Amino acid sequence: MAGVAWWKTAVIYQVYPRSFMDANGDGIGDLDGITAKIDYLVDTLGVDAIWVSPFNKSPMADFGYDVSDYTDVDPIFGDLDAFDRLVARCRESGLRLIVDWVPNHSSSEHPWFGESRSSRDNAKRDWYTWADPAPDGGPPNNWIAVFGGPAWQYDELTGQYYLHSFLASQPDLNWRNEGLKAAMLDTLRFWLDRGVDGFRMDVVHFAMKDPELRDNPVFDAPETLARSLGEYDKLVHLYDRGHPDIHPMLREVRAVLDQAEAGSGSAKYSVGEIHLLDWDEWASYYGASNDELHMPYNFAFVSGPWTAEWARNNVEELEAALPEGAWPNYVLSNHDEHRLVSRLGWDRSALAILMLLTLRGTPTLYYGDEIGMLQADIPPERQQDPWGRRVAELGRDGERTPMQWDASPEAGFTQPGVEPWLPIVDPDRLHNVAAQLGVAGSRLEFHRRLLALRKLSPALQLGDYQTIPDVPEHVFAYRRTFDDEVLSVFLNMGEGPVELDVSGTILLGTDPARVGAIESLRLQGLEGVIVR
Ligand code: GLC
Ligand code: CA
């Protein structure tokens, strides 16, 4: 749509590069693999942009979220030439390319950290956060790492602790240091110059913490809740992330993107991975004048009861919290959350996808959800995720298994006879692209129809959102309006049938047979439709 930034109307698709497509037959996905599947993404599926999880040089302690060189490609994934080929292919096909940027921490194998740890007076000492031991020799404060244990690691060589909000091999960068800041902003420029359209910014609100490193308060939770809380959630994260100085920092980040946008004449985009339950605090990351992130990810739908009331409240609360001119977004799953179909069941997950692709805002799909991939139960000896190795139930391998392209033993992900880095889990061999393409009623065809409809509908892409009131208890219904195009979406989140006084034309529904003119609307349990 002319005059509208591409990221407002785009559907984004997240590619986990280790698991999308293996071009060189080592059992691990790579950049050339993604390049080989651009036709699938653009022509078959019909998405507009991809976000590729990290492919930077990394010792892979957290599968690329531990970067040892921000401006290079890890040999597992290819090299900068392979990256350039990917950019060229995206350009050719009009697909936008978003890359992951990990600003809060590097790998402990990053040369910057090597220098920083080498002596107390090294020029890069303050590129990370170092602090003296507490009087008893223990960690400087009570902060806990997201992955468990103290957020501090003692370093013999210089007798101080360094901060790590995640693994000890992921030391936190110190954004209060001008040299570090300049170097990190340069890494953005590097990828912008190479042709990326935007960045997904990993846990970006963690980048600023209390400069005095004060203890976090202990969460005063009711007894029953307290017992179920993990170590990390037992504290209120007042001081170890989201310090108000994050806002000026994000304005500097945004300025780099704006400059590239002005220079290239093509809109640049940033989305921050910001898990916050408080809507106003969450919305503050757009910036007071829309001058920080283009959007913080809205994770309200990655967990919850999936009742009509809950869904409606989520949407209304988000719409109400948005600052003037801010653009919403929705996401159902990603590489850190259990697979959608396994979380919600088959029918409810279809309803969720119908909702995702018809609400006002930029949707992000997770690779494999379009073919209904299931959460894999990874045997302990094959667990790869550092989190899962520490606490088995927290492991994220199950949602990161290879993309299933066909029904072969390797699912078409790698060459025949090669063992993929994580097992393929497709018990009935039906959750794959080949088995679903062109098959009416398949999950893939459902996505294709929905994406095609969305692409042709200004109301779905840009229209206003309005809740439709006075509908049966288990129905979530809303209207999307743009000029004279008015579409209504009815989602029956209950298990039983409902009757609605609605007439018009069903354009598309979770049941592929349900299209055409209606005088009244009877929805089966867990059925949803779009009506014009
Ligand atoms: C984010 C990523 C996650 C990673 C963590 C540490 O939450 O999504 O995969 O482990 O940051 O970088
Ligand atoms: Ca490979």
Image: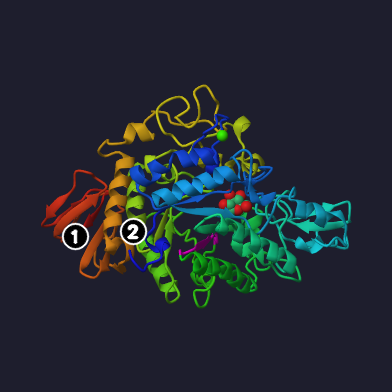
Q: Is residue 468 visible?
A: no
Ligand 2: quadrant of the figure: top right
Question: Main structural element of the magenta stretch: helix, strand or loop?
Answer: loop
Q: Amino acid at mark 2?
A: Ala
Highlighted range, magenta: 266-275
Residue that lies at the very extreme toward the top in this rendered image: 417
Disc 1 C-beta below 8 A from ligand 1: no
Looking at the image, which residue is at 26% across and 68% down? 482
**Is residue 144 one of those drawn in magenta?**
no
Badge 2 element: helix
Q: Are marks 2 and 1 in contact (CB under 8 Å)?
A: no
Q: Residue 308, labelled with which disc?
A: 2
Going by the image, does 240 lie left or right of 292?
Answer: right
Q: CA distance from mark 2 to mark 1?
A: 21 Å
Depth check: 319 or 293 in front?
Answer: 293
Q: Nearer the viewer, mark 2 or mark 1?
A: 1
